[in-house]
Image (cartoon, grey):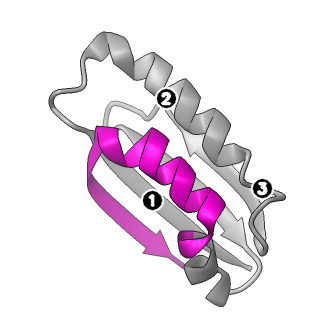
Amino acid sequence: MVHHIVMWKFKSEVQEEEKAELKAAMAENLTALVGKVPGLISLEFIDRPLGSSTHDIALVSALEKAEDIAAYANHPAHVAVADHYVRPYVTERACLDY
């Protein structure tokens, strides 16, 4: 099993009052990918980081093997969710795979 952790900051133009709704949509649509993307075992969306954190939101996912990370990244369902619910609102992406 491998883990894929991604963290983002919201873009500066995202208003504070928008963030709760955006987080809910991200969480719902990203977690729905489990069962749709081969090799994706689990996915947890982190939307309430501690104040000591450097990013606003994170995604912690488990995949069967390292090769599944690239398959997940390019899967049409993931691309659609990322393009619609995530990428328009975030910046400063950080990733760690292990």
Q: Which residue is under mark 2?
A: 23
Looking at the image, residue 39 lies above or below residue 26: below
Name which residue lies at 84% across and 58% down: 35
Q: Do the residues bearing badges 1 and 2 touch, measured as CB atoms within 8 Å?
A: no
Whether residue 93 sits left or right of residue 77 in the image: it is: left
- Secondary structure state at the residue bearing disc 1: strand
Q: Residue furthest toward the left? A: 12
Which comes sooner in the sequence, label 2 or label 3?
Answer: 2
Comparing labels 1 and 2, the label whose residue is closer to the camera: 2
Q: Is residue 37 left or right of residue 75?
A: right
Q: Which residue is mark 3?
A: 34
* In the depicted structure, whether residue 53 falls above or below residue 34: above
SS category of the residue bearing label 3? loop
Residue 29 among those drawn in magenta: no
Q: Point out the stretch of residues depicted in magenta.
A: 73-98
Task: Give the mark nearest the N terminus, 3 or 1.
Answer: 1
Location of mark 1 (residue): 6
Quarter of the image that includes the N terminus: bottom right
Res. 87 mark: none
